[in-house]
Image (cartoon, rainbow, N blue to C red):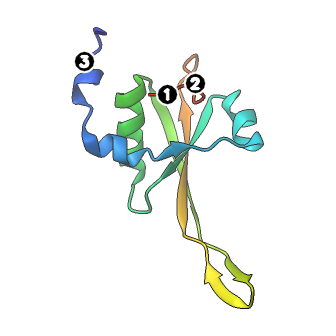
Amino acid sequence: MSNSKKSNNVTAKMYDTIVRPVITEKSMISSEAGKVTFLVPLSATKDDVKAAVENIFNVTVNKVNTIRQFGKVKRFRGFVGQRSDYKKAVVTLAEGQNIDVTTGI
């Protein structure tokens, strides 16, 4: 067990706030600058994301930017459909801190 007090405050809601990390070329380049991108629920706020990341990964968060992406309208064999809306959170970590998103929680 770690001696950090933050690990005791982890709740199930925090694990629901962080759906999964976004693994793209752009997000991997920004991770070198201390920024990590996560997919979050549409109802998640910046404060929710900050608390979840700080408590789950035991890091210090400087800033959280959120992006809401509306689903595209797509056609398949003449039928019109729409992809789901989603929300991403770009979390800026404090200097010297990092999160390895390629490993499990």
Give the structural element (helix, strand or loop) at label 1.
loop
Give the image quarter of residue 6: top left
Give the image quarter of residue 73: bottom right
Q: CA distance from mark 1 to mark 2?
A: 9 Å
Q: Which residue is mark 1?
A: 104
Give the structural element (helix, strand or loop) at label 2.
loop
State the residue at coordinates (39%, 55%): 44
Confirm or deny contact between disc 3 and disc 1 (CB under 8 A).
no
Q: Nearer the viewer, residue 43 or 80?
A: 80
Give the image quarter of residue 93: top right
Residue 36's label in the rendered image is none
State the residue at coordinates (35%, 47%): 16
Q: Position of residue 51 (x, y in %)?
A: 35, 38
Q: Is residue 98 toward the left or the right of residue 78 in the image?
A: left
Q: CA distance from mark 3 to mark 2?
A: 21 Å
Q: Is residue 66 toward the left or the right of residue 51 in the image?
A: right
Disc 3 residue type (three-letter): Lys
Residue extending farthest front: 77
Sequence-first tag of 3 and 2: 3
Sequence-first tag of 3 and 1: 3
Q: Which residue is mark 3?
A: 5
State the residue at coordinates (67%, 31%): 31
Disc 2 residue type (three-letter): Asp
Q: Position of residue 21 (x, y in %)?
A: 56, 41
Q: CA distance from mark 3 to mark 1?
A: 21 Å
Query: Badge 1: how crowded within 10 Å, few (<14), some, or many (20+)?
Result: few
Q: Which residue is mark 2?
A: 100
